[in-house]
Amino acid sequence: MKFLMVCAASLLLAPGMALATEGLWVSSAADSELGFSVWYEGEELPGRFEQFETRLELDESGEPHALTVAVEVASADMNDRQINQELGKPEWFDSAAFPRAVFSSSEIRRAGAGYLASGRLQLKGIDKALEIPLEWRRDGDSATLSGAVVLLRRDWQIGSGEWASDASLADRVELRYRVTLIRRR
Amino acid sequence: MAKRIQIESWNATARTLHWLMALLILLQAIGGWVVEEMDSSPLKVDAMTAHKSLGITLLLLLVIRLLWRLTHAAPPPPQGSKWWEILAARLSHTALYLLMIAVPLSGWLSASTSIIPWKLWWLMPWPRIASPGEDLHEIAEAVHEGLIWALAAVLAVHVSAALYHRFVKRDAVLRRMLRGNP
C-alpha cells in the first residue's frame, strides 16, 4: 500500500504529466517481468526483480508520453539465497538506505518501429540520465511494453569497494522488460 | 575379479596416496573453514574456486586410491591382534573411504546448486550434478558440514589408533605406512 502511494506521489510530482494526457496505464504485476543479467568471468547470471510498478501516460493522439518505473530493489532474485542477501548490502543496492529505484522519463520519441524514452534513473541515491528503448503494443484496454537496455553498474555504484573492478564481474548489466499494462482511465 | 596382490607392507604408491591425501585433506579443512568466514569479495570467490577444485582433486585421487586398493589386499593385521581390534580397523577404514567420497560429493552438490560459476583450477568447466536451486543448496551445505564433522571424528579415531599401535602396542602398523618395511 505504501508502495502504491509512493508511486502515485511520484506520478503527481512529475511535472506536466497529469495535464496533457489521454490515458493512464498501469502494469499488472502478475503478467510483468523485469529481468536482468550480469556476467561473472564471462558467464551470464540471470536474475529478476519481483516487485516493480510501471506507469505509462499516453498523449491526446494515443502515443506513449510519460513513463515511470518504480522498482523495489530488495526484491532482486538471482535464485541463490546467499547472493540475494548480499545484494541488499551497502556494496550493492544498499536496500535499507535506498529501497526504491525510479526511472522517470522526460521525453518519449519515436525510434524505428518503437520508442525511445529519455529520462533519469534514480538508483542508490544516484540520479543519472538513461535512455530506454520501448516496444509498445496496444490491444484495446491492455498493452505490452517490452525491450532491453544495457547499463553500466559503476554509474550507480552497484558493486562498490572490491567489487568496483570489472575484472571478474562485468560492468555491463542488461535489463529486460516485458510489462503488461492495463488502462486505468 | 583377478586375485588381489598380497603385500606385506604398504608400497610406495599406497604410502604416497595416503600421505598426499592426508596433507591435502588437512589443507582443505583449514581452507574451507577460512573461506566460510570471509566476507563477500572477488577474493572469496577465488578462494571458493580453490576449495571446490581441491575437493574434486581429492575425489579423483580417492578414485585412484580405491582402484589401487581393489587390486591389492591390505597388509595383514599384526600377529596377535584381537578380533575387536581387527573389526574396529575394518569399520573405521570403511568409514574413512565412504566419508572421503561423501564429503566431496556433498560439496560438489553444494557448488552445483549455487549460481556461482567456477572452473576446475580456473581451467576446466566442471559439470553440475544438479541445477541451481535454493532449497537443495541449503540441504547440500548442511549435509556437507555434517559429513565434515563425521570425517573429523573418524580421523581422530584413526590417528589415535595409529598412535596406540606405535606407543602402546609397539607394533609395525604405523611404520608400515611411514617407511614401508614391516
Image (cartoon, coloured by chain):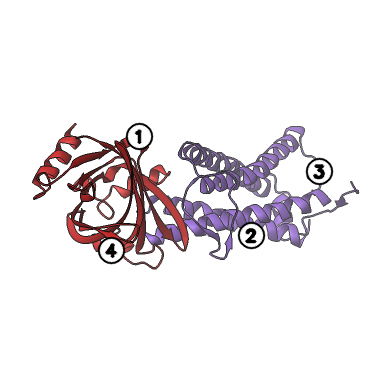
Q: Quadrant of residue A153?
A: bottom left
Figure chain in red: A
Quadrant, the N terminus of chain A: top left
Q: In the rendered structure, the residue with mark 3 lies on which chain?
A: B
The answer to whether A53 appears left or right of B94 in the picture is left
In the picture of the structure, the residue carrying the numbered disc 2 is: B20
- Cβ–Cβ under 8 Å for marks 2 and 1: no
In the picture of the structure, the residue carrying the numbered disc 3 is: B79
Give the distance between the C-alpha atoms of the residues marked 1 and 3, in whole angstroms: 75 Å
Q: In the rendered structure, the residue with mark 1 lies on which chain?
A: A
- Cβ–Cβ under 8 Å for marks 2 and 3: no
In the picture of the structure, the residue carrying the numbered disc 1 is: A30
Which structural element holds mark 2?
helix
Which structural element holds mark 1?
helix
Q: Residue furthest right?
A: B2
In the picture of the structure, the residue carrying the numbered disc 4 is: A154
